[in-house]
Amino acid sequence: MAFFDPCINEFYSIQMQSGQEFTLSHKFHYLWCVVVFLLAVLFLALSDDVVPEGFWKFLWHELGFAGIVAIVLIFTIEKFTREKHQRAADDLLDQINQDLFKTIYKRYIPNSVFNEVEKCVMKSAVFRESHQLDYTIDTFPEHTDELLRSSCFKCIAQTNYKLKNLLSDQPVKHQVTVVLERPINSAWDDLCTIEEVRINDQVLAFDQLTQATKRTDPHILFEHEIEIPSGSEVSIFTKSMLIKNKVDSEIWCSRLPSDGLTLTVSTPTKGLTVQANANHSEKLRQTLNNDVTQRWELKFGIFPFQSIIFFWKPKDANVA
């Protein structure tokens, strides 16, 4: 959408005219300095080789020497003045950053808040688009360990999204990250895994998955560095398996600014009550609800570390 504001147009016209006048004045200034310098050198040369001893020799020599000293002083003073003006301009720019928000929103934005928004959003080089999380909660097969089968569910989490490089002039490196909660019972720890990662439909080999995955005290952490070309995007798919209790919850947190999130929770056993909320200024909107599948959408911008929390419990009150 385009618009025209005569006031803004006039302001830019004045700026351009001032800039042209400033450039022309600088050109004349430097041209004058060159002329003075050349005359000073000429006077010194003539006083040494051409002009005979006497008053005129002394005068030409002093004029030449004074001209050289004047040029040195002019450039020295100009250097320090330029640095002083640059520092003043930087200080003014910092003040404008605060006053701009104060003027627009009629309130003062504390530095701590402004700095956090700037760090997490305005300086971010990567943006997430079309984020979808498909989460399946199911029972374990009959042959599984009885304690595991009776107390826990097998959960499959699949994410699909695009990472966009906001920089138009250079590629950016980014860590594709997945963080999973490890089961409390260490005997089931090996069942909790990153099963698949695809970068632009290219499946990471098993060795790459293994090398990029490490187990910390509370979590399983997957990190894989990719490069996103300037102004381009990369599609990401991940599939993970988690061990969760039969009455439990999951918090899915974004580490990047995003344009929203779609959550789909499937319960093939048909015996679960599932609810979801957003740790966000806006509420989730439920778009699908039946015995097997529920879907919620958050079609709003998401800041880093905002999240969706969903929780479940068996409909049968007798089931632990």
Image (spheres, grey):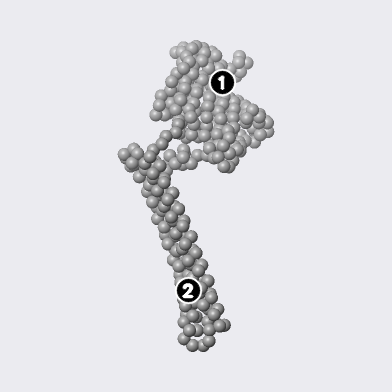
Q: Quadrant of residue 49?
A: bottom right
| Residue 243 showing in the rendered view | no
Label 2, label 1: how far apart the Cα atoms are: 87 Å
Q: Position of residue 300 (x, y in %)?
A: 44, 28
Left or right relative to 139: residue 209: right
Q: Residue at x 50, y 74 (%)?
A: 40
Q: Quadrant of residue 276?
A: top left
Of marks 2 and 1, which one's residue comes earlier in the chain?
Answer: 2
Q: Position of residue 308 (x, y in %)?
A: 46, 26
Q: Residue at x 64, y 36 (%)?
A: 211
* Labelled disc at residue 67: 2
Q: Quadrant of the N terminus?
A: top left
SS for callout 1: strand
Q: Residue furthest left?
A: 106
| Residue 257 showing in the rendered view | yes
Residue 76 to residue 177: above or below: below
Labelled pair 2, 1 in contact (Cβ < 8 Å): no
Name the residue nearer the viewer: 144 or 230: 230
Q: Residue at x 38, y 47 (%)?
A: 96
Name the residue nearer the viewer: 168 or 269: 168
Q: Position of residue 89 (x, y in %)?
A: 41, 53
Label 2: how many residues lie within 10 Å, few (<14), some (14-19) or many (20+)? many
Q: Residue furthest bottom?
A: 53
Q: What amino acid does circle 1 point to?
A: Lys
* Labelled disc at residue 273: none
Q: Position of residue 283 (x, y in %)?
A: 41, 24
SS for callout 2: helix
Q: What amino acid does circle 2 point to?
A: Gly
> Circle 1 sits on which residue?
154
Q: Residue at x 31, y 39 (%)?
A: 106
Left or right relative to 86: residue 153: right
Number of numbered discs visible in the structure rendering? 2
